[in-house]
Image (tube, helix red, strand yellow):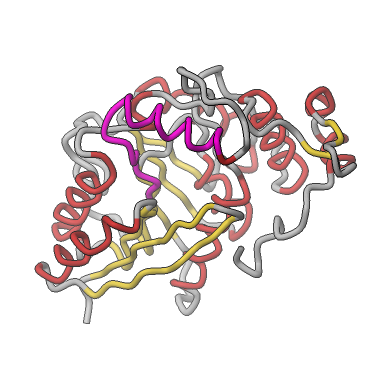
Amino acid sequence: MHPNNIHNKSYNFDRLIISNPDLKTFVFRNEYGTKTIDFAQAEAVFQLNKALLLSDYGLAHYQLPVGYLCPPIPGRADYIHHIHDLIDSDPTPIKGLDIGVGANAIYPILGAQIYQWYMVGTDINAESVEIAKNTIELNPQLKDFIDIRFQENPAHIFEGIIKEDEHYHFTICNPPFHASEKDALKGTQRKLKNLNLEPKSTLNFGGQAHELWCNGGEALFIKRMIKESKKFENQVNWFTTLVSKAENLPKLTKQLNKLKATHRIIDMGQGQKISRILAWHFHD
């Protein structure tokens, strides 16, 4: 993990349970005598990440309806710290845009609470937008730092969101990387296998359809993002996105080269999961 990530060490479950007593039900000792939870159980994962938000990031309230994607906080914090490295030399108040903020609103929350960035989050799902807005309302310290916006046209990414007079230091995105529900189910089965658990015929890591898959999957979504980003080259310093599948990088960098964009790839790793950030801009 990034050296500034406070989650580099093992979870202190005793401390986390103090912040979120509901977590206690899911904590047990494994065969090595270490306290842990069942990471294949959606409710256990939610209560753990809720505890992290309450204990480490100063939230007073956090709740997600059943079935919505609950992101692992350590990995999301890693992305935020890498973005900080990317823009560290900029002395002005920082403003970022999260594409696909989801109901969890996790990137705006972390950006605001770790670095006091002003964050805008956008999503094509109206219900997710309302849930995210409710979280911000329940935590007054976030109100001056986070703005959640509904993207009315699913065909657009930046259009209709970035206003004519707005400037952003960066954009971030964790795109839906599956091309279909079938592919998403296969992904869940792989995760269960990595956890030495029996595969199941249902998704049990949480997530709505728009959070998990889209036509063409990750590669097509990011290609659309790259194409549209050119229109906003003078309003954004750095465009960035997570790329989960390494095999997608050649076609994405090829498109960036075609548009004469300067780009770089930032490697990230959390445990067994390897990912990378693709970042680009159109400035000299």
Residue nearest the viewer, comparing 12 with 88: 12
Residue nearest the viewer, comparing 215 with 152: 215
Q: Residue at x 61, y 55 (%)?
A: 271
When the figure is inspected, residue 130 is found, relative to residue 89, above or below; the finding is above
Which quadrant of the structure image shows residue 152? top left
Q: Position of residue 194 (x, y in %)?
A: 57, 41
When the figure is inspected, residue 45 is found, relative to residue 267, above or below; the finding is above
Residue nearest the viewer, comparing 34 with 14: 34
Q: Position of residue 130 (x, y in %)?
A: 45, 23
Q: Residue at x 20, y 33 (%)?
A: 215
Whether the magenta-drawn stretch holds residue 189 is answered as yes
When the figure is inspected, residue 148 is found, relative to residue 258, above or below; the finding is above
Q: Which residues are magenta?
A: 173-193
Q: Position of residue 216 (x, y in %)?
A: 20, 38
Q: Main secondary structure of the magenta part?
A: helix
Q: Residue at x 82, y 31 (%)?
A: 27
Q: How many numbered marks have been drawn onto this rendered protein structure? A: 0
Q: Which corner quadrant holds the N terminus? A: bottom right
Answer with left or right where residue 228 lies relative to residue 75: left
